[in-house]
Amino acid sequence: MSYSEKKQQYREAVRRAVQWLTDRQEEDGGLGALQTMSASMVVPASLLFCGRPEEAARHIQWQRRTYVKPEGGFDAPEIRVGRPSSLAERPYGPAWMIYSGHVNLAYDISLRALPSLLAMQDPQTGGLFGREEEAAAGRGIINTAVTAVACQAAYTAGAVEAAVRMADHLCRVIDANDWVRVFYPAWDTERGLRTDDELAPTGNMPRRIEREAADQHHHLTGALLAVLSDMYSITREQKYLDAAGRVFEFVAGAPRETLRTTLAHKLAWGSAWFYRETGDARCLEVACTVCDHLIAGQEADGSFVHWALIRDVKDWPYSSRVNLTAQFALWLQRAANCL
């Protein structure tokens, strides 16, 4: 199948996914009973870039009433109830909320929340802690997944100096790996790169990503590719493109079957963004490998579930379906735009 034909397929999948989201949008702009703020975090960006700006604006208004504190920042239900996965990656949802708000011109949300996000940045490494108590102590695990999405939020909202320090830390992690068979993403302020099995993984940061294994968390390699490609575009610093290149070679050298997993979803975005900077045709092949798998698993109603994590569609709750459908639609749209 030609890239032109694939582009049409991906855009049709996006149309169906966005229709599923907008069919569930209520008069107040919300999407029904969402259990977490994270379920909503990418929705406004996805709706905007997938051609539904009015619905995006209405959802932003609902987010403002539902999650935004009067003094700025967010009141996330998952944090309020002490959800362990959210406490381990406390800045992750806020980073996406800042990004989604800013691209939708909701500067009162994004710019007022930015200081609390940057408060989680380690003064020494430039990366972001996942846990608030570790940020307060100034030592602990620097979360690579959190740092990547926070970097995107920072440069989007104009905090380029802070974003540079985050990107420099991502380069530090990349340079500390040999990228032969395994990628270790976690950094410890006391011990450096963590390659041991004692490290507790978090929702978006596994202990390791194995090149030859199936169902690896390549959403993380995808996020690294995307953010470092953006940082190269912003600064023209070759080190960011070189670091992204090491990540891409690791992915491109993996058996294609290992990339056919919903856990690789952000790799569609990252490969497309790396293609924009390099023109390397292999990027499109990798992006299409991921996209083809995503659309093959799209539900009949247009929504998406995480088949890498479940066996029965009933095991994927509504809030998570909203989040994943918004994300997959956005990555498919970005990949399609590069074909």
Image: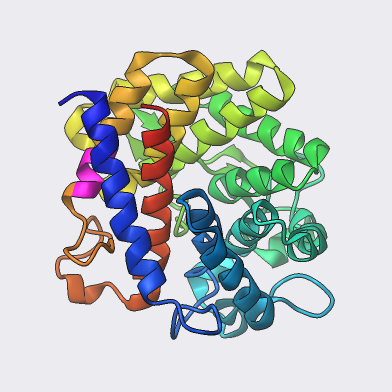
Q: Is residue 77 left or right of residue 3?
A: right
- Residue 269 vs 244, above or below: the answer is below
**Residue for point 15% across, 26% down:** 1
> What segment carries the magenta color?
291-295
Q: Residue 198: say if magenta.
A: no
Q: Residue 293: say if magenta.
A: yes
Residue 322 image-quadrant placement:
bottom left
**Residue for point 59% across, 42% down:** 187
At which x and y percent is residue 256? 20, 29
**Residue for point 80% across, 43% down:** 159
**Residue for point 70% across, 39% down:** 166
Q: Is residue 277 left or right of residue 147?
A: left
- Residue 141 vs 5, above or below: the answer is below
Q: Total label count?
A: 0
- Residue 144 vs 42, above or below: the answer is above
Q: Is residue 56 left or right of residue 331?
A: right
At which x and y percent is residue 211? 30, 30
Instruction: Say which of 332 and 127 sits in front.
Output: 332
The dominant secondary structure in magenta is: helix
Is residue 228 visible from the viewing direction of this image? yes
At which x and y percent is residue 117? 74, 58
Instruction: Say which of 321 and 105 sits in front.
Output: 105
At which x and y percent is residue 335? 39, 35
Name the image quarter holding the C terminus: top left
Is residue 216 visible from the viewing direction of this image? no
